[in-house]
Image (cartoon, helix red, strand yellow):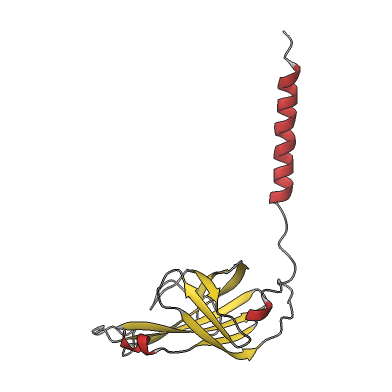
Amino acid sequence: MQKPFAVYISALTILLTAICLLQTACRFNPNTQKPGEGYLQGEWQQDTSALQKKLVDYSLYNIKFNCDSFFVSIKTFSKANSGADSCTKGGQWTEYAKGVYQQKNDTLHVRGLFCNANFTYKEPAGCYRSGVYEEYFKVSNKTDSTVQFNPTSSVIAINAHLVKRYTCNPKPL
């Protein structure tokens, strides 16, 4: 019994498609950092608003962008009584995260890991958050020295001013 020509063509097409997908899906990572967004390069400090100071809890962001990488420190203030919790240290604490970012249109996606202040990996045990840090921001009101980040996880915008401008010099990975 002879198989029709169409069956052979279909099998060949499926095989070639699988080979093509394997070749495009398996690529080496780049050897150097990507340049990132030019307007973001530098250190950005969040400005405190009168509204924030009226809240029970609020956070202030300091974000550094260097090429395609970021480092953020998030200083949190809380008026809530945390009892004998040694982590909150009188209603103030700071968390740190580092990773890479990408911008598509007006959306900035940052993804990394929580870390210690010296950029070392933060162990899961202990105070505050650990593991993956991921956030999406809508970026607006950009000037040379100001930018507004609107996080998708909060209704309070981060109005930041430029503290120091950096120049991206991509480093080998």
Q: Nearer the viewer, residue 55 or 100?
A: 55
Q: Residue at x 73, y 58 (%)?
A: 28
Residue 23's place in the image compared with 8, above or below, is below
Q: Position of residue 29 (x, y in %)?
A: 71, 62
Q: Residue at x 71, y 21 (%)?
A: 7
Q: Position of residue 8 (x, y in %)?
A: 74, 22
Quarter of the image with the N terminus in it: top right
> From the viewer's perspective, is 89 left or right of 164?
left
Q: Position of residue 159 (x, y in %)?
A: 49, 84
> From the viewer's perspective, is 29 left or right of 119?
right
Q: Position of residue 30 (x, y in %)?
A: 73, 65
Q: Residue at x 58, y 73 (%)?
A: 99
> From the viewer's perspective, is 119 left or right of 37?
left
Quarter of the image with the C terminus in it: bottom right
Q: Nearer the viewer, residue 149 or 166?
A: 149
Residue 171's place in the image compared with 60, above or below, is above
Q: Residue at x 41, y 73 (%)?
A: 154
Q: Quadrant of residue 130?
A: bottom left
